[in-house]
Amino acid sequence: MTDTSSQAKATFRVGSNIAFIKYWGVADPELNIPLNNSISMTLADAVTVTTVAWDREGQLAQDEIVLDGQRLGPETAQRLVRHLDRIRALAGFQHRARVVSRNNFPMAAGIASSASGFAALTVAACAAAGLRLDASRLSALARRGSGSASRSLFGGFVEWEQGADDATSVAHPLFPPEHWPLLDVVAVVSRAHKAVSSAGGHTLATTSPLLEGRLAHVHNWLVEVREAIATRDLARLGPIIELDALAMHGVMMTSSPSLLYWEPATLALLHAVRRWRRQEGLPVYFTIDAGPNVHLICEPESLGPLRERLAAMPEVQEVLVSGPGPGPQELDEHLF
Ligand code: PMV
């Protein structure tokens, strides 16, 4: 990171990430300490660009935040303002901030905009404040905004350690993006905002009778996923990521109140993926976050045949494709 202490403005581009072993449920909702380790791939082409400028002249009465062209009202801005408060506390000042942020993918539809969003806000706000934190500290700080954001601090394949406290619950890279050109092909079936945010959902996980079952198995799944990534073995990785996504959605569906993120189109895709694999030998596997859209994980040679099949499904509104990407990139060009 360059020395930005002389300027009060910084811009970063940060990739979202797709989890192969999911984060669902918190041991500590204030710190976002999760109930298990999670493993993800940082995405090259699903990114957030964020510019933060601290108002050293005291012109602003409150933080001014514009997300995808929309100025946020006090209620929607609250979570971001709280995050800026954490950074103000670290920097030891009270300046308000101007924040402009843009995603190149639909927000709040199960494509983790909160991951890249909070990671980008964290690195841009810290750099603009002249705070020189190492990647591990930044990961811990991003986690406070949104758990999955802790993983977007690193490129490629990443593991977030559950940890025991604020300092130890951080992500670290497993393999760089060049290790394996795996693709996340997102079949967008809805652009609607989800009814329950994942932040709210995490606190419900402990009400599910299935939570213990998932947590009892997740350790072994983590071992498998690490090894499958190390050996670039999709036939080994795929079944485990499907199993964990289904286990997480089982927990979601059986919590009180019940969270049902799937739409009929979601289920149509799950059946289609299994049909393509079993009957047509197409090596593609699914995972789903807190939304109805389906992430299809495959290797580059399967992309053409997969696109053809998705194009024939009326449920699929749009297809977004991304391979593994780098960690946060500082940009010279600001959004304002
Ligand atoms: O970081 P949050 O609070 O948006 O939670 C993310 C939860 C999932 O996307 C469903 C799973 C994950 O590990 O990314």
Image (tube, rainbow, N blue to C red):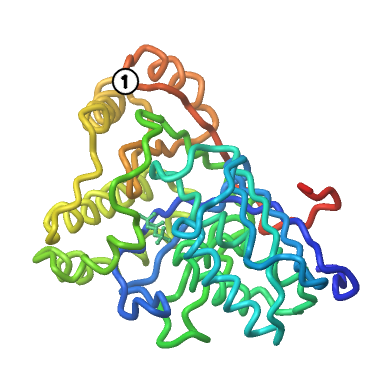
Q: Residue furthest right?
A: 6
> In the structure shown, which secondary structural element does the residue marked by tag 1 occupy?
loop
Q: Is residue 257 left or right of residue 164?
A: left
Q: Is residue 249 left or right of residue 334?
A: left
Toward the viewer: 114 or 84? 84
In this rendering, the answer to whether 222 lies above or below 197 is below
Instruction: Say above or below: 273 vs 120.
Output: above
x and y, in percent, of residue 321 in the image:
53, 33
Depth check: 54 or 172 in front?
Answer: 54
* Frontmost residue, 293 versus 7: 7
Q: How many marks?
A: 1
- At 47% from the left edge and 43% from the top edge, which residue is drawn? 107
Q: Residue at x 66, y 73 (%)?
A: 135
> Is the residue indicated by label 1 positioned so its CB lies within 8 Å of ligand 1?
no
Residue at 80% x, 68% y is 1
Q: Is residue 243 above or below residue 146?
A: above
Q: Tell which of 47 and 193 is nearer to you.
A: 193
Q: Residue 123: horizontal and vertical position, in percent? A: 68, 66
- Image-quadrant location for residue 89: bottom right
Q: Is residue 100 left or right of residue 36?
A: right
Give coordinates of residue 160: x percent, y percent.
Answer: 47, 70
Q: Residue at x 34, y 80 (%)?
A: 28
Give x and y (percent) for residue 187: 40, 30
Q: What's the residue type where badge 1 is placed?
A: Glu
Judging by the rendered image, the residue that carries numbered circle 1 is: 315
Figure quadrant, ligand 1: bottom left
How would you rate the neighbour count of disc 1 (Cα within 10 Å): few for under 14, some for 14-19, many for 20 or more? Answer: some
Outermost residue toward the left in this view: 209
Q: Is residue 279 left or right of residue 101?
A: left
